[in-house]
Image (cartoon, rainbow, N blue to C red):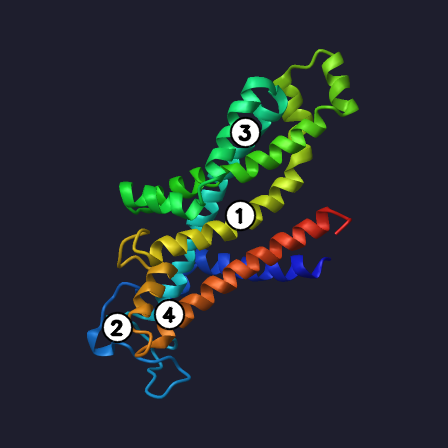
Amino acid sequence: MNRKLLIGAILVGAIVLVAILADVIAPHDPYRQQLVMRMKPPFWAEGANPAHPLGTDNFGRDLLSRLIHGSRLSVMVGVAAMLLAASIGTLLGLVAGWRGGKTEAVIMRLADAQLSIPEILLAILVVAAIGGSAVNLVLVLGLSGWMVHARVVYGLTRSLRERPFVEAAISQGATGGFIVLRHILPHLLPVLSVVATLQVAQMILQETALSFLGLGLPPPAATWGNILAEGRERLFVAPWIANLAGFCIVLLVWGVNILGNGLRETLDPRE
């Protein structure tokens, strides 16, 4: 088995399991404030409290519990936004690649126009206008990232529609919709799985960036971006807050990227 695929699957699977079981494994309520316990250091520093192994924040909230619950929000928003982007992009890419002509021109020029705007900039503008919530984040990130899937699907569909098995299906009277769903889409799934996996990491980074800028879920929501923003304000007093949140973000994104690269190498024998 591909080593990258194995390492990525174990790492991402462990984080997803933590996110699913957050309510069970979190030792404390992530929103419970204990001002007498504020900014307690983690277990490796002097003055640590055994009840809070990773320390506490400025309001005395257990940092380990907040990081555990933050994994759930990051994974949920990242995966949901990716699924929305993949659904829209795959549909439009199939339509453009199969039909061609004016339909292709309109869809691909729309994709090109949106690609000319940085995704994070577009997300910042839209979220600033409509407000930050889990649903808004998913919609904004999904609608700003569909072009990647559309361009990949469009190129592959144009290539596949010239294959002999597609021409044979047309000669037998099969409709365009049947050919796309029965013959073309199954050939796209391996490539789409790789693109989708890699895009999850990008969605998680963008969600974290928006939360860090105060445009994500409003405080006191336990998101890694919010924890990172809170830690930035006390970086020289309680550096573990920002450092631990940043470590979690890096670990998840690295794991997803390793998983995506492993999938690509496994599915493409030329790698």
Expressed as whole percent of the image width and height from the top left, the position of residue 55 reads 34, 76
Q: Which residue is depicted at the point 69% across and 34% down?
A: 187
Expressed as whole percent of the image width and height from the top left, the position of residue 206 reads 43, 52
Identify the element where label 1 is drawn. Answer: helix
Q: State whether residue 118 appears in this view.
A: yes
Q: In the image, 86: left or right of 270?
A: left
Identify the element where label 2 is drawn. Answer: loop
Q: Which residue is mark 1?
A: 199
Sequence-wise, which precedes: disc 2 or disc 1?
A: 2
Comparing labels 2 and 3, the label whose residue is closer to the camera? 3
Expressed as whole percent of the image width and height from the top left, the position of residue 264 reads 67, 49
Q: Which residue is mark 4?
A: 242
Identify the element where label 3 is drawn. Answer: helix
Q: Is disc 4 in contact with disc 1, using a CB cutoff of under 8 Å?
A: no
Comparing labels 4 and 3, the label whose residue is closer to the camera? 3
Q: Which residue is mark 3?
A: 108
Expressed as whole percent of the image width and height from the top left, the position of residue 69 reads 38, 60
Q: Which residue is depicted at the point 55% across and 58% down?
A: 12
Sequence-wise, which precedes: disc 2 or disc 3?
A: 2
